Image (tube, rainbow, N blue to C red):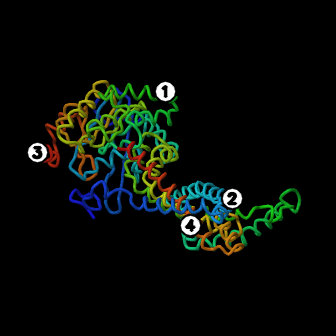
Amino acid sequence: MPPRKLTISTERRVVLEARGLVKRYGAVTAVDGVSLEVRAGQVMAILGPSGSGKSTLLRCLNFLEVPDAGEVRLEDKVVHARDRELNALRARVGMVFQQFNLFPHLTVGENVALAPRTVRRLPRAAAAALARDLLARVGLADKADSPPSQLSGGQQQRAAIARALAMEPAALLFDEPTSALDPELTGEVLEVIRALAAEGRTMVVVTHEVAFARAVAHEVVFLDAGSVVEHGPAAQVIDRPTTERAKRFFRR
Amino acid sequence: MIGPDGQLSTGHVGRLARAPWWLLALALVATLFAWNVASSEVYADILRALLSGLWVTLAVTAVAFPLAIGLGLVAALGLLSPHPVRRNAALLYVQVARGVPILVQIFIAAFVVAPLSIEAAHALSGGRGPLGALRSADIPMAIWVVAALVFAYGAFEAETIRGGLTSLARGQAEAARALGLSRRQALRHVLLPQTFRRILPTLGNDLISLLKDSSLVSVLGVRDITQEARLYASATFRYTESLTLLALLYLALTLLLALGVKALEQRYRRHAA
């Protein structure tokens, strides 16, 4: 096992780990040497001002952005930027996007069943049954045969969560899951994420919802200008930040 | 042109004004003409001659179009490839195929590529076996013409498919890859189905163009409807009747295709909405 840096629930095994991640776009360094460990059954919230590199960091974790330096470990194995390894990593790490990104040419049920059918090679009927179960769990049992365009934003995001769950991921990444939603629709999505946390899912959530992070996250990473400025238990980072930058951010 | 609701429209028109009058006019002319054909021995004779070439026209189109889409798909993936060799090969192909007239490509296929291929077959087989005994007459001219049409239209389809693929939201590919789908699976299950729905109108246009360009096979003596019309006309000096009937036959075929494509579009639109 690698040496452990964190003080939070160190008895739990590390599921997903980043070491010294760097991502540059030309002269801009979006992620500047970030290390973090996500432990089984824990929820990590990544907070920070706009442009602090939160989303880029999250996208580096499943190589939607290929980091320029550093490494990502999934269940203690280093992931290299090779197609086969990336497919395996992504099949084990689910992702939920700000814009939902449901597939518009498939029904909601087919959206959920596609990856189990093609990647896990489940028979069509089994994949469809799995999709129905998962949709029922996010409160969309009656929408399996609808096209995504007939769903509200909140429903689409819940369907996207069901789609990510269908791969039985070891960890789930959420990239600002409520930022594209009308305020009255964020609650239903946060409720689903809260329920997943309660059942012990391993998750990393990039969010602007500070109150939600304090209520659900076990630990919080505060990011500024691509670097981790504060890192610790949610209540400590949010309520008693030590750095000037974090104090200013959480005072709002 | 753009209405107050921001939608493209032809102004405020009633049901009567929106009716396809052009189609009615065409149908009327066609009916009169059909009447003429039916009651005239000459037209009936020409029609019989043309119909004997109809299956060639249809077969050339039906074989060349799917092959052109297949070639276009490969080339489109090449155009979008990060791999410099593949991208440049695809660019070279598209530029050459689009930049040389189709008629010239047909001539090159028939008079340059065809004999070279026969020679290559002889050289490779050392003059023995079925390949060694191959003569140019063994390969029908129609094969070379279809190959040329596929080559030429593959470039159009490559650009169409490339445009369709790049018009999809980036999140679609990301969502597919984030689920663990391989590049190939993401293309097959997520990106291409959406692309084809989106480019269907363009593909329909290309199919109609290809049907018309299939008339070029006649320059090599392949007996499609154009060739049959020319043969009939030059034998009987009935140019007016032969060529008018020929034009109407093409028009009937392209209209049928256009209606078919429209029906397909409407079906997808209903499903997508």
Q: Is there a contact, CB below 8 Å, between mark 2 and mark 3?
A: no
Local secondary structure at mark 3: loop
Indicate which disc residue B247 carries.
4
Q: Quadrant of residue B51?
A: bottom right
Q: Kindly report which numbered mark, 2 or 1, lies closer to the viewer in this rendering.
A: 2
Can you tell which mark lies on residue A252? Answer: 3
* Both labels 2 and 1 in a single chain: no
Q: Which residue is mark 2?
A: B52
What amino acid does circle 4 point to? Ala
Q: Looking at the rendering, in which quadrant would you find the N terminus of chain B?
A: bottom left
Task: Report whether residue B96 is seen.
Answer: yes
| Picture residue at 63% right of the left edge, 74% below the top | B239
Relative image position of residue A49 (x, y in whole percent): 20, 49
Label 1 is found on which chain of the structure? A
Real-space Cα separation, disc 3 to disc 4, in angstroms: 75 Å
Considering depth in this image, is B269 or B70 the residue closer to the camera? B269
Question: Disc 3 or disc 4, which is closer to the eye?
Answer: 4
Q: Chain of mark 2?
A: B
For this rendering, which residue is in front, B171 or A3?
B171
Percent of width and height locating residue A99: 30, 45
* Residue at which label 1 appears: A125
The span from disc 2 to disc 1 (Cα, nearest Å) is: 49 Å
Q: Which of marks 1 and 3 precedes in the sequence?
A: 1
Kind of residue at badge 1: Ala
